[in-house]
Image: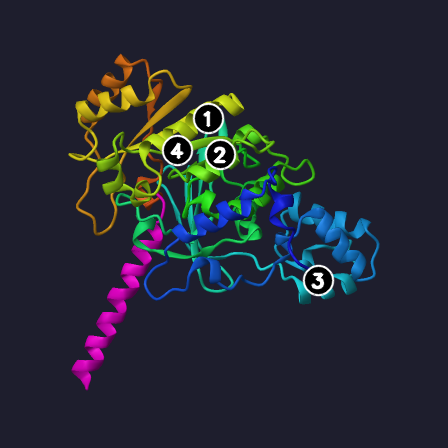
């Protein structure tokens, strides 16, 4: 059974949609030696790649009544089952057939780290084909937020991002995006933990993990609809935020969607010279085009745009840079999140000092730009995007080099 076509997964169906998708795929330049994203083999479908209508059709094709699909759906999205054997009220014959066609394929936990205060949990998952992704659960008194990955690796190459060092392996399937959240739903629902602050369910999602979400537009929206669906996770659209480096055609598509999901833009510089040096995608979608797309998005949706601005010492954190940002965003319905850069393994770049952050913020205040400083949770466990994967890969390379040296010496 094939996945639902793109036109059914997004709200806009204009002729240019396929063209825009192809153009974005062309931007996904994978790491050396990898095949292009648009030619990559998709992994085998798992059960979580099916939406409820698709699952219902599959169950009927296998010779069972439609209500069995709703039972299975409940096991997935209310009980967070990871094995077919958990579905105790579903006929074994049906479960056996489903297991052959669409395995549940739960994500394999490779590394899990918990911050000292217990309120941030980061997991490195391995997918069925060996690709690895990261997800983070961040607990606050008023919310339980999961930071979700949408690609294995990333092709955007942002200089201050650990994932940018990895290159791109492939897009994630919708089910692989969904499974990251279900992993933490299961943890909060079933594992007693005083550090969970009383949370029993995930309440918020930020698509700010590994990868560029709008470069995986169809599977992104398929997962968003699953999270929002009353018979899925029943999460409010405004509880979800999608972050992008600024893929202008897809921002315009995003404005057409029928769910009011929040939009965040990774800006990080207010002029083309500096931004292109930090985010290579700016060479394709320069600042003026990006800001115009954001203004059009606000006019169309009447929703605020958040701008992410990572402060890198000596690069984009001067008072002059703040004034330039203030002039660029003046009068927009927006909010700026100022984020001192997290350390990236192998990089000499550093986050701005507290004094530099305050000086930058003071300049923005002069322009009336709403802003706040966001210090990343979980710094003690490499909770920022890609850090755990980069650390693991570096460790494995060192181990392999040592084995090679030992073998050489022994020979």
- Residue 2 position in % (x across, y down): 66, 58
Distance of mark 1 from mark 2, alpha carbons? 8 Å
Distance of mark 3 from mark 1, alpha carbons? 45 Å
Whether 96 is drawn above or below 389: the answer is below
- Disc 3, SS: helix
- Disc 2, SS: helix
Locate residue 260: give its quadrant: top right
Q: Is residue 156 magenta?
A: no
Between discs 3 and 1, the one toward the N terminus: 3
In the rendered view of the protein, which quadrant contains the C terminus? bottom left
Looking at the image, which residue is at 45% across and 34% down?
Answer: 139
- Disc 4, SS: strand
Between discs 4 and 1, the one toward the N terminus: 4
The magenta-colored residue range is 384-411
Distance of mark 4 from mark 2, alpha carbons? 13 Å
Label 2 sits on residue: 252
Frontmost residue, 262 versus 37: 37
- Residue 186 position in % (x across, y down): 57, 45
Q: Given this view, does label 4 or label 1 mark the residue nearer the observer?
A: 1
Which label sits on residue 265? 4
Which label sits on residue 296? 1
Label 3 sits on residue: 98
Q: Given this view, does label 3 or label 2 mark the residue nearer the observer?
A: 2
Looking at the image, which residue is at 22% across and 36% down?
Answer: 274
Asked if labels 2 and 1 touch by Cβ distance under 8 angstroms, the answer is yes
Is 205 on the left-hand or right-hand side of 312? Answer: right
Between discs 3 and 2, the one toward the N terminus: 3
Between discs 1 and 2, the one toward the N terminus: 2
Distance of mark 4 from mark 1, alpha carbons? 14 Å
Is 245 on the left-hand or right-hand side of 48? Answer: left
Frontmost residue, 257 versus 362: 257
């Amino acid at each position: 059974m094939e996945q639902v076509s793109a036109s059914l997964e997004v709200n806009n169906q204009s002729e240019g949609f396929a063209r825009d998708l192809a153009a974005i795929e062309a931007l996904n330049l994978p790491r050396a030696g990898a095949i292009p994203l648009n030619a990559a083999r998709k992994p085998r479908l798992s059960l979580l790649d099916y939406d409820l209508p698709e699952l219902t059709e599959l169950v009927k094709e296998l010779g069972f009544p439609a209500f069995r699909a709703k039972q299975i759906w409940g096991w997935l999205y209310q009980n967070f089952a990871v094995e077919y054997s958990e579905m105790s009220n579903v006929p074994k014959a049906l479960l056996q057939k489903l297991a052959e066609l669409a395995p549940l394929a739960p994500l394999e936990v490779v590394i899990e780290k918990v911050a000292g205060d217990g309120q941030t949990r980061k997991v490195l998952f391995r997918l069925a084909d060996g690709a690895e992704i990261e997800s983070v659960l961040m607990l606050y008194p008023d919310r339980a937020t999961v930071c979700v990955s949408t690609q294995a690796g990333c092709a955007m190459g942002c200089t201050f991002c650990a994932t940018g060092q990895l290159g791109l392996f492939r897009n994630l399937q919708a089910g692989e995006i969904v499974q990251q959240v279900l992993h933490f739903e299961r943890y909060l629902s079933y594992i007693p933990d005083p550090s969970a602050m009383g949370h029993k369910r995930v309440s918020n999602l930020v698509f700010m993990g590994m990868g560029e979400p709008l470069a995986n537009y169809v599977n992104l929206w398929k997962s968003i609809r699953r999270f929002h669906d009353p018979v899925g996770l029943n999460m409010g659209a405004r509880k979800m935020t999608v972050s992008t480096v600024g893929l202008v055609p897809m921002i315009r598509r995003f404005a057409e969607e029928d769910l009011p999901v929040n939009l965040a833009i990774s800006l990080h510089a207010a002029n083309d010279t500096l931004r292109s040096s930090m985010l290579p995608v700016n060479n394709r979608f320069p600042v003026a085009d990006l800001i115009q797309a954001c203004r059009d998005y606000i006019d169309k949706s009447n929703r605020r745009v958040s701008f992410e601005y990572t402060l890198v010492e000596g690069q984009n954190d001067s008072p002059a840079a703040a004034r330039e940002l203030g002039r660029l965003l003046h009068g927009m319905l927006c909010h700026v999140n100022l984020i001192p850069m997290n350390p990236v393994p192998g990089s000499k770049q550093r986050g701005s000092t507290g004094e530099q952050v305050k000086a930058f913020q003071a300049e923005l205040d002069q322009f009336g730009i709403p802003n706040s400083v966001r210090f990343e949770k979980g710094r003690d466990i490499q909770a920022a995007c890609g850090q755990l994967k980069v650390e693991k890969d570096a460790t494995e390379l060192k181990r392999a080099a040592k084995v090679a040296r030992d073998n050489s010496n022994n020979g």
